Image (cartoon, helix red, strand yellow):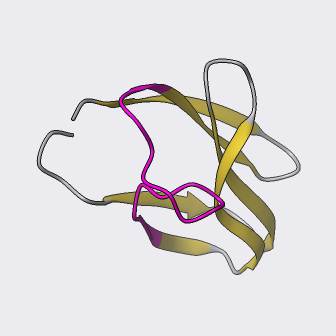
Amino acid sequence: MYGHNNIDIMFNLAKDGHISIDVYDFLGNNVATIANGFYFSGSHTHNFNLLDNNGNRLVSGAYQIRFNSGMDVKQFKLIIAQ
């Protein structure tokens, strides 16, 4: 992540529905919401600017990106090194 100010989050939905994509710190606190709403089936891309819910740049460390479609929850690790 060094030198990058944002990342693209890409996902495919098999059917229409509500999704949320949130970022959690190592303590389990929700620090950022990338997406939260209704999406149609198909491919989607969201740009995440690495800012927390208060507009501050995320500090170096390990985070979890949690994708919740209501039927499925997937988690991915995000490492930020500045």
Where is residue 33 drawn, in percent x and y? Answer: 67, 58
Q: Is residue 61 left or right of residue 14?
A: left
| Above or below 47: residue 63 | above
Q: Depth check: give the residue in front, 67 or 34.
A: 34
Q: Residue at x 18, y 53 (%)?
A: 4
Q: Is residue 11 left or right of residue 73?
A: left
| Above or below 13: residue 29 | above
Marker count (numbered): 0
Residue at the limit of the structure toward the top, as seen here: 27
Quarter location, residue 30: top right
User: Which contiguous range is marked in magenta?
Assistant: 45-62
Q: In the picture, which quadrant includes the N terminus?
A: top left
Where is residue 17 drawn, in percent x and y? Answer: 82, 70
Main SS category, magenta section = loop
Where is residue 50 drawn, in percent x and y? Answer: 42, 55
Q: Depth check: give the residue in front, 31 or 36.
A: 31
Q: Is residue 25 left or right of residue 60?
A: right
Q: Depth check: give the residue in front, 16 or 27.
A: 27
